[in-house]
Image (spheres, rainbow, N blue to C red):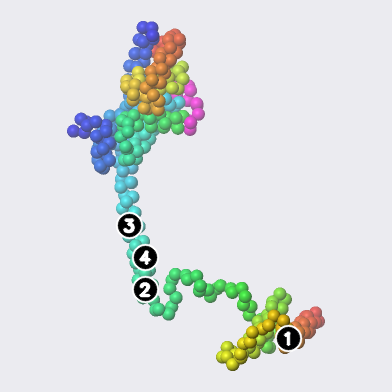
Amino acid sequence: MTDDTQQNLDELAQAYQSIEPPPELLHRICEQVQQEEQQTSSLPVWGAVATAVVCVALAMLFTFDLHRPVDKPRLAVEPNIIGPNTIEPNIIEPSISSGDLQIPALSSLTTSVAPTTESKTRAQLPSLGDLSGISLTPISPTAKPPQQPAPENSNRSSDISTDIFEFLEEHNHDNTV
Amino acid sequence: MLQQLTDKALVKRYQHHDLDAFTELARRHHQRLYRLAAVQLIDASSADDVTQEVFMRALKGFKSFLFLAEPSTWLYRTTKNVCREFNRRKPAQVEDEEEYATGLPEEALASQRTIGQVRRLVKQLPERQRDVVMLRIFEELSVEQTATIMNCRPGTVKALLHKAMQTLRKNADNVELLQ
């Protein structure tokens, strides 16, 4: 390195060292540091207050829940209990009652008949106590299967559907007139 | 009392909730950090903001400081990073320093001129060589400290310094900026 370059570099270094920050800079930094520290130190206080509130709320919740009568359901949702607003998919309430003139939805007409017949069939079945006297004999493989009696309610269901269609036709006729 | 403690001792005290120790750290280093920022920034007037931002980061960073390096090294490195962020935010719009300097008080004007002169010198160097000149020659840091700040080996610092001197010698006419 030449002497000139070294000298210039030294002078530049001196000039660099002479760069001074504004006198209020340190004061500003200290102020900001104190503000920041106050904010961060107040955070745990707020956290403690929030935790206490949550704890009290939880304690109250559990206290009321324990004093609840035994027959009433608890707050927790049990998986097997179906709430009052839950729609059971397999149960379709019959929409036609005697003397009721409201027209049911067409889609529900055929399905609404089924539970009625099914319930009747179930009602006709003997109870388990009545079957106690029947002796069970082994069935030979060559034996013919017992003949199934013709379903008694087949004519009845067709009668019901005929009635419904007649009712619908009449009603439609009334509407058109 | 606090003035006699080392930087590491001050950081340790700050970690035990002694805010005065942190204030002492700020008092010790704010001038150096300001100078470093003033030369590295495109807009030298943001040097105040950069210095403040560095100490705000130190306020959080020193709480979990592991003492793998000197606290001053951490501060220099953070200053470099913050300057880079500021330069990225502000495009090269304050190129005309003479125009910017008009309207400033006499003292501030002289300071701006000096910053301009140093900056013009370091501008002719690539970034890495510029950092070496500023840290090793202007700030008089050790080779090891410079290497830690620049995230390289001490040998690289020596090589970069040598190259920087060659560049300056080549542009010897341009170096006479102080006159």
In this picture, is B80 found above or below A132? above
Of callouts 2 and 1, which one flags the residue occurring earlier in the amino acid sequence?
Answer: 2
In this picture, is A171 found above or below B103? below
Q: In this image, A99 relative to B59: left or right? A: right
Mark 3 residue type: Val
Which circle, 2 or 1, is nearer the viewer?
1
Q: Distance between the residues labelled 2 and 3?
A: 26 Å
Residue visible at 38% across and 30% down in the picture: B77
Which circle, 2 or 3, is nearer the viewer?
2
Write down the chain letter for disc 2: A
**In the depicted view, which residue is nearer to us: A21 or B37?**
B37
- Disc 2: which residue: A66
Q: Distance between the residues labelled 4 and 1?
A: 67 Å
Q: Quadrant of residue B69?
A: top left
- Asked if one can make out residue A157 in the rendered structure from this viewpoint, the answer is no
Label number found at residue B15: none
- Disc 4: which residue: A58
Residue visible at 30% across and 47% down in the picture: A41
- Disc 1: which residue: A147
The picture places residue B152, in percent across and down from the top left corner, at: 40, 25
Q: Is mark 3 on a helix, strand or loop?
A: helix
Mark 2 residue type: Leu
Q: How far apart are marks 2 and 4 (CA)?
A: 12 Å
Q: What stretch is highlighted in magenta?
A: B88-100
Image quarter hosting the N terminus of chain B: top left
Of callouts 4 and 3, which one flags the residue occurring earlier in the amino acid sequence?
Answer: 3
Of callouts 3 and 1, which one flags the residue occurring earlier in the amino acid sequence?
Answer: 3
- Disc 3: which residue: A49
Q: How far apart are marks 2 and 1 (CA)?
A: 61 Å
